[in-house]
Amino acid sequence: MAGKNHDRRQSGQEGRDANRFRRPKNTKKTLGRMMSYLGKYKFRLILVVLGIALSAGSNVLGTYMLKPIVNTLEEMVRMIGTDASYVPQISAIVKYLVIMGAGYLVGILGLYMYNRIMVTISTDTLYRLRKDMFERMQKLPIKFFDTRTNGEIMSRYTNDIDAMREMISQGIPQLINSSIRLIAVFAMMIVISPLLTLITVAVLAIMLLVVRTLTAKSKFFFSKRQKAIGQMNGYIEEMTEGQKVVKVFCHEDEVKTGFDVINKEVMDTTVSANTWSSILMPIMGNLSHLHYAITATAGAAMAIGGLIDIGSLASFLQYSRNFSMPITQLSQQFTSAMSALAGAERVFEIMDTEPEVDEGDVTLTYACRNANGELMESDHKTGIWAWRVPEENGVKLIECRGAVNVNEVTFSYDGEKTVLHNVSFYAKPGQKIALVGSTGAGKTTITNLINRFYDVQEGEILYDSIPIKRIRKSELRRSMSMVLQDTHLFTGSVMENIRYGRLDATDEEVIAAAKLANADFFITHLPQGYNTVLTADGANLSQGQKQLLAIARAAVADPPVLVLDEATSSIDTRTELLIERGMDSLMQDRTVFVIAHRLSTVRNADAIMVLENGEIIERGDHDSLLGQKGKYYQLYTGMFELN
């Protein structure tokens, strides 16, 4: 059964990845977006092009200088046996060599200049790309992360960005360099011999046809490889996090089998991509040798016939050899560009994903009461919160008391399967509302909707009589704290992790919150107490200790509404009893939503909602529900298990 579940999960993930991934449909548009990031470096890019032109021009000049050098040497050969002086010819050769050397020196300086500048440009461009992608990611809805693995997202920051780095730092300069050299060499070949140039053009047509065919193939497989790498990273990340579960259930073989399938896909696509990319060089090399042989034979015949001098032929042959090199380099860069464009489109996919829609205009503020008992805004924490509700004639202050009204809410995550069916209930300020029921009954979905991680399709949710769609999401979530079953601790000290609940909390407030959650005792016994640095998601803490820190984090936020989603699931019974009084203090005068499988934790709830298949089938307090002897009675007495 576990193997089948794993196969279903894996096939589902493959399907989601396949839908998310797309080959570059508009290469010009994707390349244009990449180039837009280089727009701020116009002056430096001009220097880069100038440096490339100097480098390419030096090679062209150096090759052209072969013509006068060879012709002068030929003249000296003809003078053998005569009394003529060789001094003028030697002086001329020295002059040509100096010109050639000076040209190559300028080329080296140009090469150094544009490489140095491109290092700065590419590094800064990638910095801005990552920055923009990360900023956009912070604005994306929870749904985006619920439908993608962490590893698949991370692949865009690593593999895809790295492919773009290679293109910006190496590919683009090489493309410009090869293009300039190709144009300059072709122009010089026409100047030297238009007839021999026709032979080159004929071979060039064959080369371009080969390049077009092979790059199309490599583009397809490079795209598949990028997708497969992202899928593999997601699988590795998932299995690494769940390694304990894998070992507990002895699923090592199934996990290895699943990885082998994905790894083989990466291998196959990489082999195919590299094969089509690698055969380009030998094919182009052989065509280049064939072209050189044909040109040398035709040039020799022309030289014998007096149609071209030996120096011009020597220069032309060198140009013909150099002519095929830029084409080969261009073809290589095209294959690399396909990988970069595939990665760029995956990066831009995140940037193009619609951010969370937030049309709310209601904000949260500190408040106090004047002598007449009227609410007034305050610039510091007073223990009273208020909603700033814009109206036609100004702003109205409504005290944030934590009254939550869920009114006939129907919801579906995917638009097909309905998770909640016409759910309604009212939580009065300060009430403790417990949500119980089988896994998948819709308990967590209700809290997701109250936090506006998702928006309801039908019905509405009112918060202090204000539709939550009117409340700005950041302000809504600031008025609530959540303690989740799966805790997450950040790299930093214990103090900083608790303060994450409210960044402006003082050290004294953090310690008070820890004491309220009964976390102070174990914290003070850590090596550096509250200054103990946590790494790897608090790997040096027990699961119960991590959960206590999460509760302390919620306590320091001091919100009107508290959501506890299996908050004590990882705490043993003894620890649970120890923190019960602290939790009662934490929940005092707050509206609290408790999701729990351990029904002993909800006995003192003001109202208990029993959910089944997305509907509330029973409601009441602990005693009244036991008296009904319905589903809750069965759950509490163990006649029916939560599963």
Image: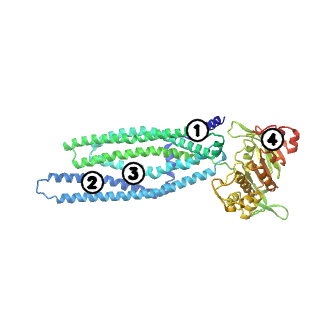
Task: Kindly report the distance in space between the C-alpha atoms of the residues bearing marks 1 and 4.
Answer: 38 Å
Q: Residue 459: percent from the left, percent from the top?
A: 76, 42
Task: Kindly report the distance in space between the C-alpha atoms of the residues bearing marks 3 and 4.
Answer: 71 Å
Q: Nearer the viewer, residue 614 or 625?
A: 625
Element class at badge 2: loop
The residue wearing badge 4 is 610
Q: Residues within 10 Å of mark 1 (few under 14, many from 20)?
A: some
- Quarter-wise, where is residue 206 in the image? top left
Task: Kindly report the distance in space between the C-alpha atoms of the residues bearing marks 1 and 3.
Answer: 45 Å
Q: Residue 481: percent from the left, percent from the top?
A: 74, 53
Element class at badge 1: helix
Q: Say what amino acid the circle numbered 1 marks.
A: Gly
Check the image and report above or below for 223 versus 90: above
Are circles 2 and 3 on residues that touch, CB within 8 Å?
no
Q: Nearer the viewer, residue 34 or 542?
A: 542
The residue wearing badge 2 is 65
Q: Looking at the figure, which quarter contains the C terminus?
A: top right
Task: Kindly report the distance in space between the C-alpha atoms of the residues bearing marks 1 and 2.
Answer: 62 Å
Are circles 4 and 2 on residues that touch, CB within 8 Å?
no
Compare marks 1 and 4 and give the one earlier in the sequence.
1
